Image (spheres, rainbow, N blue to C red):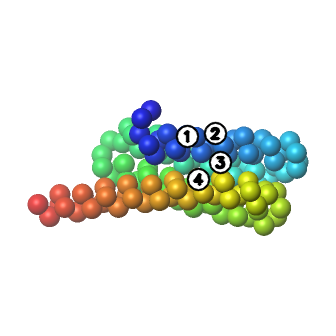
């Protein structure tokens, strides 16, 4: 696994799993952590799936889903911070990683869509 977005999304998923386990063990919160666990690990799963895409359109679709999951993950993180399940330090660290993933995915999607448009015009 030497693809930067694949590596970053996998590392992020590991952080999410550990964070959710910590919150469940310490704060006994299960509903929000279940949502965060689903969306936070789905980013990497969709990135991994995009690597086996059958077409450029399939690749774009998988990465678009990963981007949506990153946005949802950001929402759950903000909610958990507002509800005091995350400290400001925990929140700042993991949110920075989430935002970085969003930026990476957005850049890949823009360049891929741009190439599709260029190919259609040639």
Is 88 left, or right, of 74 in this rendering? Answer: right
Looking at the rendered structure, the number of numbered marks drawn on it comes to 4
- Say which of marks 3 and 4 sits in front: 4
Residue drawn at the location 82% of the way across and 64% of the way down: 83
> At which x and y percent is residue 106?
43, 60
Q: CB atoms at circles 2 and 3 under 8 Å apart?
A: no
Which residue is tagged 3? 38
User: Image quadrant of residue 32?
Assistant: bottom right
Q: How far separated are the C-alphas under marks 3 and 4? A: 17 Å
> At which x and y percent is residue 33?
75, 50
Residue drawn at the location 88% of the way across and 50% of the way down: 27
Q: Which mark is residue 10?
A: 1
Can residue 79 be seen from the camera position used here?
Answer: yes
N-term mark: 2 or 3:
2
- Front residue of this view, candidates 34 and 22: 22
Q: Which quadrant, please, contains the C terminus?
A: bottom left
Which residue is tagged 4? 97
Above or below: residue 21 compared with residue 106: above
Above or below: residue 121 compared with residue 60: below
Q: Which quadrant, please, contains the N terminus?
A: top left
Which residue is tagged 2? 14
Is 117 left, or right, of 3 in this rendering? Answer: left
Q: How far separated are the C-alphas under marks 4 and 1? A: 11 Å
Is 117 left, or right, of 64 in this rendering? Answer: left
């Amino acid at each position: 696994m030497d693809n930067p977005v694949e590596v970053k999304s996998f590392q992020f998923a590991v952080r999410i799993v550990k964070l959710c386990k910590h919150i469940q063990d310490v704060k006994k919160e299960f509903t929000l952590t279940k949502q965060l666990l689903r969306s936070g690990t789905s980013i990497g799963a969709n990135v991994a799936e995009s690597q086996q895409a059958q077409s450029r359109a399939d690749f774009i679709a998988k990465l678009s889903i990963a981007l949506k999951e990153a946005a949802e993950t950001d929402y759950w993180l903000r909610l958990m911070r507002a509800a005091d399940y995350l400290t400001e330090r925990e929140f700042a660290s993991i949110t920075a990683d989430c935002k970085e993933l969003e930026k990476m995915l957005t850049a890949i999607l823009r360049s891929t869509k741009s190439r599709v448009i260029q190919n259609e015009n040639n």
